[in-house]
Amino acid sequence: MAAVLVSQFHARDAEGRVYSVHEFQESTPSADGLTAVTTYKLAIGDRVNKLDENEFLLVQSGVTLIREPEASVAS
């Protein structure tokens, strides 16, 4: 089972530390065959679970992370 990096973003914990989170999509579909399996990991490899659209949980430590808003680029 291979995974492809599809996105990366920053998230902060309650103490203000910033984490680089990578979003991967597995090449093997889910058991129902209809949806792609998406996993999240920190850049250093720690597993991350998605709780809702902007909230994530570090599996190893139980720390909650909030996704940083996308920075807009001025033209």
Image (tube, grey):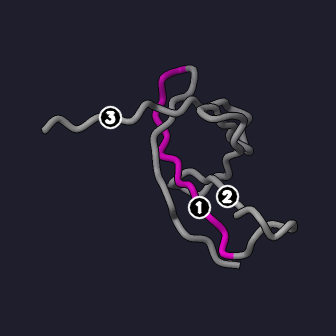
In this view, which residue lies farthest toward the top?
Answer: 15
Q: Secondary structure at mark 1?
A: strand
Q: Is residue 38 magenta?
A: no
Identify residue for label 1.
24
The answer to whether the residues at label 1 and label 2 have Cβ atoms under 8 Å apart is yes
The spot of residue 16 in percent (x, y) is 48, 23
Identify residue for label 3.
71
Give the extent of the magenta segment.
15-27
Say which label, 3 or 2, has the lower sequence index: 2
Left or right of residue 37: residue 53? left
> How many residues crowd around disc 3 within 10 Å: few (fewer than 14), some, or many (20 or more)?
few
Identify residue for label 2.
38
Image disc number at residue 6: none
Q: Quadrant of the C terminus?
A: top left
Is the residue 44 above or below the residue 27 in the image?
A: above
The spot of residue 57 in percent (x, y) is 69, 37
The spot of residue 41 in percent (x, y) is 60, 53
The answer to whether the residues at label 3 and label 1 have Cβ atoms under 8 Å apart is no
Residue drawn at (62%, 64%), measured in percent from left and top?
A: 25
CA–CA distance in space, label 1 to label 2 = 6 Å
In this view, which residue lies farthest toward the bottom?
Answer: 1
Q: Is residue 22 magenta?
A: yes
Q: Main secondary structure of the magenta part?
A: strand
Q: Secondary structure at mark 3?
A: loop
In this view of the protein, which residue sits in the foreground, 30 or 14? Answer: 30
Q: Quadrant of residue 14?
A: top right
